[in-house]
Amino acid sequence: MSKRVLIVDDQPGIRILLEEVIREEGHEVISVCTGAKALDQIKKQQPDLLLIDYKLPVLDGPAVLDELKDQGLSIPTIMMSGLAEEAGAFRQDYDFLIDVLAKPFDILKVRKMVNQALKEGSNQV
């Protein structure tokens, strides 16, 4: 069964690469370039998994996760960051934050993380 994945990254090359990898796994992919657009998209259609960059202009990854938490939304999330250690410090703040993916990332690792997160998410329903 196809799942919906929302990718949030301000770098077009990363969005395109992730879209391709996740679509190859048979999932629906939506991608946006800002945290504000991510929140708008989530209001329209909640994803099964959120891949969000830690550092985004204006509304960064943690700010988006704070907003989701405030709204009572618990979307399984993987945070991506070139500052993985710094981003990892936020793990305890969000029970829906599954993992932190260090940039640059290994595509095989991304594929495995996404499939595992979507599999675990379907077991929670």
Image (cartoon, helix red, strand yellow):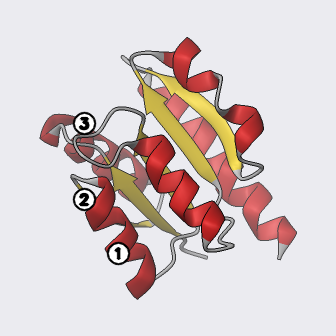
Q: Secondary structure at mark 3?
A: helix
Mark pair 1, 3: CA separation: 19 Å
Count all numbered tags in the image, as a single digit.
Answer: 3
Q: Picture quarter containing residue 17?
A: top left
For marks 1 and 3, give the one nearer the viewer.
1
Q: Dot 1, crowdedness within 10 Å: few (<14), some or many (≥20)?
A: some
Indicate whether 89 appears above or below 4. above
Mark seen at residue 14: 3
Q: CA distance from mark 1 to mark 2?
A: 8 Å
**Residue at (85% x, 67% y) in the render:** 123
Horizontal and vertical percent for residue 50? 50, 56
- Residue 28 visible somewhere in the drawing: yes
Other residues around mark 3 within 10 Å, as few (<14) / some (14–19) / many (≥20): some
Mark number for residue 32?
Answer: 2
Residue type indicated by callout 2 = Val
Q: Secondary structure at mark 2?
A: strand
Instruction: Kindly identify the amino acid type of the residue bearing the numbered disc 3.
Output: Ile
Please name the amino acid that badge 1 sits on: Gln
Viewer can see residue 30: no
Q: Is residue 25 above or below residue 107?
A: below
Q: Residue furthest left?
A: 12
Query: Relative to residue 65, is residue 119 drawn left or right?
Result: right
Which of disc 3 and disc 1 is earlier in sequence? 3
